[in-house]
Image (tube, helix red, strand yellow):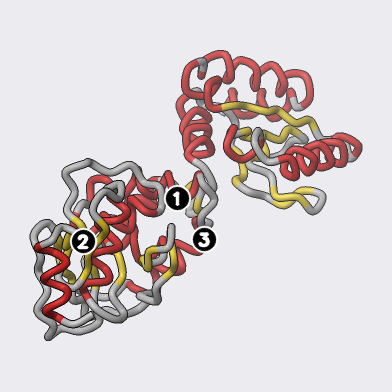
């Protein structure tokens, strides 16, 4: 299409221009994803949705007032349409585009770092969403943070703080439920536990030190929706029980709404199966 034909089509209301060089047919349903894609295409080759827009594409809840964020490799291209924030980062690490709903966007790790540069207060919530959805494991995020950590890199501080808040004994937690359970153990002064030990070949959420008592945190998103995970949990529990271990399962509702009941249940289990551990800890 020639430039003249392009403008004639706009004037005739055959197409509606969304960004320089990008248009849609009149009557096509408008959407946020459409506006993000238009901005990415208008920014030129190599451009990706980033920062707040990337967070939204990865399923993070974002305010409707967010501008569209686009990152470009070129630092000389003039691109600043209304409602779009153009980023020209010096740090090009992890900027390889990943298709998300057909839109080139940044990786989850890069998104979390970039989000920390423009909206640090919402990084913890974004981190919870990404980890809970099993988009990427905490260890991979920590590795990405280490790759980007250098003096002056925006977003590193916010992401590191969010990761540290989710870590237990310096081990990244796989879920917010594990963090809440660790807080419950400390709050009710229960005997110390080991986080993510390997028992009979299985990674367990918590093991009460010096005992056969294991604690498993059953988040609905991880254990209630996936049939394969459900079957794996049954096999693991049967194997551990046959090996002489006692498994205490806790859920989000129990830990957050009935913490006292959870603590009393654990104390009762310890009195039954590890009375010496409970007695020694109470005496100390």
- Circles 1 and 2: CB atoms closer than 8 Å: no
> 10 Å neighbourhood of mark 1: few (<14), some, or many (≥20)?
many
Which of pointers 1 and 2 indicates the residue nearer the eye?
A: 2
Quarter of image, res 85: bottom left
* Spatial separation of the CA atoms under disc 1 and disc 2: 37 Å
Percent of width and height locating residue 19: 16, 65
Closer mark to the observer between disc 2 and disc 3 = 2
Q: Which residue is mark 3?
A: 139
In the drawing, what numbered circle is on residue 15?
A: 2
Q: Secondary structure at mark 1?
A: helix
Asked which secondary structure carries label 3, the reply is: helix
Mark 1, residue position:
130
Q: Give the mark, 2 or 3, whose residue is nearer the N terminus.
A: 2
Label 2: state its secondary structure.
strand
Residue 102: x and y in percent read 42, 63
| Nearer to me, 258 or 183 | 258
Tag 3–tag 1 contact (CB < 8 Å): no
Coordinates of residue 47 in the picture (x, y in percent): 28, 75
Choose the circle earlier in sequence order: 3 or 1. Answer: 1
Q: Quick check: 194 left or right of 77?
A: right
> Which one is closest to the eye, mark 3 or mark 1?
1
Compared across the picture, whether 83 is left or right of 276 comes to left
Image quadrant occupied by the C terminus: top right
Query: Is residue 209 placed above or below 70 in the rendered structure?
Result: above
């Amino acid at each position: 299409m020639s430039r003249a034909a392009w403008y004639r089509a706009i004037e005739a209301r055959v197409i509606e221009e969304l960004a320089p060089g990008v248009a849609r047919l009149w009557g096509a349903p408008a959407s946020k994803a459409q506006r993000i894609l238009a901005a990415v295409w208008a920014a030129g080759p190599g451009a990706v949705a980033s920062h707040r827009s990337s967070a939204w594409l990865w399923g993070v809840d974002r305010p409707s007032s967010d501008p569209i964020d686009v990152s470009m490799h070129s630092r000389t291209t003039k691109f600043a349409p209304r409602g779009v924030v153009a980023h020209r980062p010096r740090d090009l690490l992890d900027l390889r585009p990943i298709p998300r709903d057909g839109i080139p966007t940044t990786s989850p790790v890069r998104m979390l770092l970039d989000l920390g540069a423009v909206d640090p207060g919402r990084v913890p919530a974004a981190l919870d969403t990404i980890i809970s959805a099993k988009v990427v494991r905490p260890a991979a995020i920590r590795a990405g943070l280490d790759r980007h950590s250098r003096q002056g890199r925006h977003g590193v501080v916010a992401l590191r703080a969010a990761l540290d808040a989710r870590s237990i004994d310096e081990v990244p937690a796989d879920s917010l439920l594990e963090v809440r359970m660790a807080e419950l153990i400390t709050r009710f002064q229960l005997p110390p536990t080991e986080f993510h030990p390997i028992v009979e070949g299985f990674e367990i959420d918590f093991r009460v030190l010096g005992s056969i008592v294991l604690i498993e945190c059953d988040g609905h998103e991880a254990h209630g929706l996936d049939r394969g995970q459900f079957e794996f949990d049954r096999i693991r529990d049967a194997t551990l029980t046959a090996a002489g271990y006692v498994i205490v399962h806790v859920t989000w509702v129990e830990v957050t709404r009935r913490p006292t009941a959870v603590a009393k249940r654990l104390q009762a289990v310890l009195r039954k199966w590890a009375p010496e551990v409970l007695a020694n800890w109470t005496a100390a």
